[in-house]
Amino acid sequence: MQAQSVQCCVTSPPYWGLRDYGTATWEGGNTECDHKRFNAYPTGLNGSCDAQDNGKFFKDLCPKCGANRIDSQLGLEESPEIYITRMVAVFREVWRVLKDDGVMFLNLGDNYAGSSMSGGGKESSTLVGTHHEDRNGCRFNGVKRELGGLKPKDLCMIPARVAMALQSDGWYLRSEIIWYKPNPMPESVTDRPTKSHEYIFLLTKQDRYFYDAEAIREKAETAGDTGLGFYPNRAFAMGRNPFGNELNGGRAILRPNFRNKRSVWTIATQPYDGAHFATFPEEIPKLCILAGTRAGDTVLDPFAGSGTTGKVAIELGRRAILIELSPAYVQLARERTNVTPGWF
């Protein structure tokens, strides 16, 4: 992609240790083998198999037939440090193609240390990627080791770690937005609150950038709240033309009953009947795209999934570039982005 060709990036990468998106291929071995773990497979190492691993693919080598697993997907790294390093590398490329006044909205969720981090939903005492598991997915002699300082049941704090790594790599971390889900996934835990939020980070290349606060202003909760526009010099600094009273050099138009968008977004999860199971609701990219672009600008999503960002961008009169590893999801994205473009 050409440098500085994108105005805004809106994306949600695979969360660390949460899901296997099924993009792996197998090299060598027996073509009729399913390459999956199962409880009855003999360990030969005095270990006891973890029943939660039933039905999962072997990580890198199938001990049943000797096939090697070839996989380019992100999110299944052996440690948070490797995952974060790869995320930083991906977003260096986003930095390269992003315009100097461009913005990036990065959605990330967190998880807990435990064997569920490769696709389950329970916290347990086996950490993904630890070397105390043998090739069969069984615990080796019952040893439990810590991974990167994480103990079983620890909250991993991956969003914060990624955001701080990007900040150290040169990005401006301008806002931490809380996506509150009024209809979160139920959890069977009873020793902590049910998680009902994720994070959206607003990151920029420089301290002056395009951001249209007016486009996403929200209704005030009380009659006394009002929203003010911007002085002309601030409008120009933000990359947009002044309007209304700004043209006369005075304060911008008073907007009774409206206020600047807050940093907690209450947005219910949105069902999607396609095959992709990690689709975020359309309201999220809509807010990000309205705030971060003008009509006709280009929006990038390097982890496109089923194409939600692209669909919303096109409907809002923007252009979209989508990147996706899974051929199945590419087909979903092609179907979802076959929509009527908005005017620009």
Image (cartoon, rainbow, N blue to C red):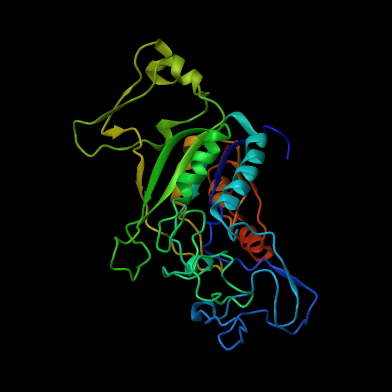
**Residue reaching furthest to the right:** 28
The quadrant the C terminus occupies is top right
As drawn, 71 above or below 104: below
Residue at left offset 57%, top offset 80% = 55
- Asked whether the viewer can see residue 294, the reply is no
Judged left or right of residue 27, residue 251 is: left
- Asked whether the viewer can see residue 199, the reply is yes
Which x, y percent locates residue 146? 49, 60
Q: Residue 297: which quarter of the image?
A: top right
The quadrant the N terminus occupies is top right
Most foreground residue, 165 or 102: 165
Q: How many marks?
A: 0
Which x, y percent locates residue 45? 60, 81
As drawn, 185 above or below 297: below
Most foreground residue, 261 or 342: 261
Which x, y percent locates residue 86? 63, 48
Most foreground residue, 138 or 312: 138
Most foreground residue, 60 or 180: 60
**Residue reaching furthest to the top:** 249
Which x, y percent locates residue 2? 73, 36
Q: Residue 129: which quarter of the image?
A: bottom right
Judged left or right of residue 199, residue 336 is: right
**Residue reaching furthest to the bottom:** 40
Residue at left offset 56%, top offset 83% = 46
